[in-house]
Image: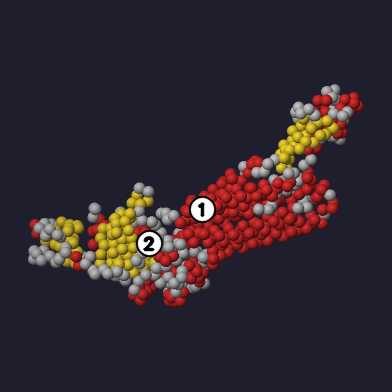
Amino acid sequence: MSTAVTTAAVETAGAGHRYGDFWALRECTLALPAGSVTAVVGPNGAGKTTLLNLLVGLLPSSEGSLKVAGEQPSTEPDFLARVGFVAQDCPLYKEFSVADLLRFGQAMNPNWDGELARDRLLAAEVPLDRRAGRLSGGQRAQVALALALAKRPQVLLLDEPLASLDPLARRDFLKTLLGSAAATGMTVVMSSHLVGDLARVCDHLVVIRDGRVRLAGELDQILSEHVLVSGAPDQTARLPGDVQVLSETHHERHTTLLVRTPRPLLNPALTTAPVDLEELVLAYLERPR
Amino acid sequence: MIWTTWRQHRAEAAVGAVILAALVAAMLTVGTIARSRAHAGLEALHRDFHTIPPFTAALVAIPLLAGMFWAAPLVSREYEAGTHRLAWTQSVSPLRWITTKIALIFGVLAFAALVLGLLATWTLDPLVPAFGGRYNSSWYDIQGMVPVACMLFALSVGVAASALIRRTIPAMAVTLLVYAVARIPVHWFRPHFAPVSTRTVTVPVSTLLLKLEGNPEDFAGAGASGDWVLHVRVTDSSGHPLDTHNGNLSVVQQYCPALSPTRAADGGVHVDADACRATIKALTIRDTVTYQPASHFWFIQAVESAIFFGLAVLFVTAAVLAVTRRRPT
């Protein structure tokens, strides 16, 4: 990554977490700049939830170090006040009304911006007097997001926030989220098992599988570094040494490679084409380590 | 945190308030009526208030129910609903979260137990002489400080099970089990929480002859004194144990082997006692009584309370450690 990262809002160095003998996450090294919007992508069980729980301090790290909003994640109120968290499945107290949940947020957070939360929920047409257990999935997600945003966090972490939402609710959710991120300059990290959900909205990407980070970086740079190369097999076999081949498809008379290259390939015998993000992520996920 | 605790537990608080109000009303009523009848004598009190001991014995379950239904779900229901990830990612540390909840809920319920314990002590005051004193196991546990200690102990077991097991139903079952296992043996140890006293009662054998269907232990003098008679050893005047398997009759027969009783139609025992009467004249037996004096009641209560306050501290510590030590969820 060549980005001039002056202040990384989320920084991990060789971080990991072990459940007994099983490493859910190992040697995770990331640097996400302040104000960035990052998608953490990987299949179920890849270690996304573990990573987010480490970042918010719900889990202790078994190795390495982490820094979020300039501090090591912990259960200290000072740290928790700087971090917003929307947990998987948007857990809420079912018997609380939405207004009760806002009061809960106010009682539990010193920097609480109740007006912001109320405005967001009114804009999303969430009835404040309804009990959380009777809200739709999209409304639950909006309430969970409003609770996290009203903390006015420096870093907002969201675990699979879109998983249970229909396309319309997804769009509304992302609209609220990105509008707030743009207005406040906060750093957003969200996980998903589908990259398609987040490709349009994020500027950083982390691909994770089997507890290991497979790919991490700025999205534009990742897209510019990766290219589909086609040509006769004898030509595609003679790529420069610093070009990394991620996958190859053999056709009758030519071969197509997905490669990572630090600079444009100039061989006229080869045709190059930009790679689709989803295809790129799949290539990293399918690759044996 | 205080508002959050109130909002999460206000339904339980309402149920508790109703139960408390009903018990306070019942105890005030019983206590008032018992005082108005105190002049009627112990036998009349015993007859009129014979439903009270079973009722007070049932009240012993109150701390256990509080532990099972209030404390055992305290942490586990957060885990079961996933809301621990909401609660513990606000700007409140899990330590403050659990300690505030414990302080408020335990405080309120301990206060309720104190009110009931002191009120029960007052209510039973006119009744205890008619039912063998304050040590009567039907109401020992609901008087004074012991209800407070039992309440805090049951709640601490519940919250520790809740935090360690993280599942409500198993936590309730474990609470029931641990509470029962800890409380039941106390009834065997309680007599030894204070030094016991002994006294000797000398009974003329001729007195036994007048009441052959009775037992020699009856003269040990428990009853209205409020002492807790633990053991009565029946011996002859020189200290040799006497056979008491058939009550006074078998004791008298040891002095007058010829005595042959006949059971009459009215259930009484009739003997041809004339021959015997001369033999036993001036003979006595001895009841050696081991007992806890009524005056030790509050000391024994204090010892028992201290034990269960101590256990409560241990279980609360376990619960706090389980919540604050971050573990996989």
In the picture as drawn, the residue positioned furthest to the top comes out as B258
Q: Are marks 1 and 2 in contact (CB under 8 Å)?
A: no
User: SS of the residue at dot 1?
Assistant: helix
Rendering coords of residue A245 (x, y %) = 17, 58
User: SS of the residue at dot 2?
Assistant: loop
Report the residue marked by disc 2: A73
Would residue B320 be visible to someone looking at this image? yes
> In percent of the image, x 46 and y 69: which residue is there?
A109
Rendering coords of residue B189 (x, y %) = 64, 41
Instruction: Please give left or right for residue B151 compared with residue A108 in the image.
Output: right
Nearest the viewer among B322 and A87 is B322
> Which image quadrant is residue B271 in?
top right
How crowded is the residue under tag 1: few (<14 C-alpha within 10 Å), some, or many (20+)? Answer: some
Kind of residue sitting beneath label 1: Thr
Instruction: Please give left or right for residue A175 compared with residue A244 in the image.
Output: right
Rendering coords of residue A76 (x, y %) = 43, 63
Kind of residue sitting beneath label 2: Pro
The quarter of the image holding the C terminus of chain B is: bottom left
